[in-house]
Amino acid sequence: MTRKTRDTQDDVTFARRLSDGEPDAVLAFERQYRGMVRHALGRALRKWRPESPVEPEDYVQDFMGFLFNDGGKRLRSYAGRASFSSWLYTVALRYFQRALSQLAKDRRSGDVLAQLPDRGENNPESIAARAHESARVRSAVQQLPAADQLYVRLFFVEGLNASEVAKTLGKGTSAVRMKKMRMLDSLRKLLDDDKGEAK
């Protein structure tokens, strides 16, 4: 057995112990790898440069939740084809770039619920188009899970920002932003599916 093979087998064992939440493995992870996760976030931030301030530790914690979610399923997917550190850095970088690129996409496209025809146009065609679009959006929102519908209400009906929603629900601001992105993505898919069915 080569040293490289032995090292990756050790890494696989470590990943399994980590996914099981064994205290010494978790402590070793915090000591050896949290800095690497922060570095991956820093690289993603340099690429996407979000306009609003970012709380790095919130994003790091979100990633940790992602790793350990569902009984450590993501960690158990590590199969030793590369070193654990290389695998972890790649997973973290992809996670942060996806999250930050989604923020950028939301800024460019605007909120789904705001993409209705110009409210200043009061001719019958515009009024009918707005009514139709509003009905489509309401129908899509009703198909979302109850928790997502609550986010829609807080963000778009009550007009709260992410910090205010976080305070209202007792959650972290970064977690709320991520939830909003996922909810908007689900809503877009529902609206796109509705367009496809209408053709």
Image (tube, rainbow, N blue to C red):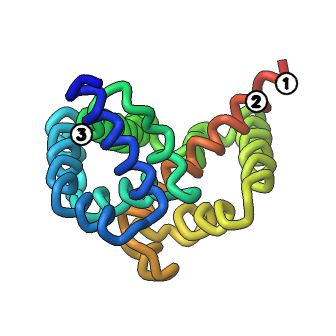
User: Which quadrant is the C terminus positioned in?
Assistant: top right
The kind of secondary structure element at disc 2 is helix
Mark 1 neighbour density, 10 Å: few (under 14) some (14–19) many (20 or more): few
**Residue visible at 30% across and 27% down in the picture:** 5
Q: Position of residue 109 (x, y in %)?
A: 45, 35
User: Which quadrant is the N terminus positioned in?
Assistant: top left
Q: Is residue 41 above or below residue 108?
A: below
Q: State the residue position of label 2.
A: 193
- Numbered mark located on residue 47 in the image: none
The kind of secondary structure element at disc 3 is helix
**Residue visible at 73% across and 59% down in the picture:** 145
Disc nearest the viewer among 3 and 2: 3
Drawn side of residue 121 relative to residue 57, left or right: right
Asked if residue 107 shows in the view, the reply is no
Q: Is residue 79 above or below residue 61?
A: above
**Residue visible at 21% across and 42% down in the picture:** 40
Q: Position of residue 37 (x, y in %)?
A: 23, 49
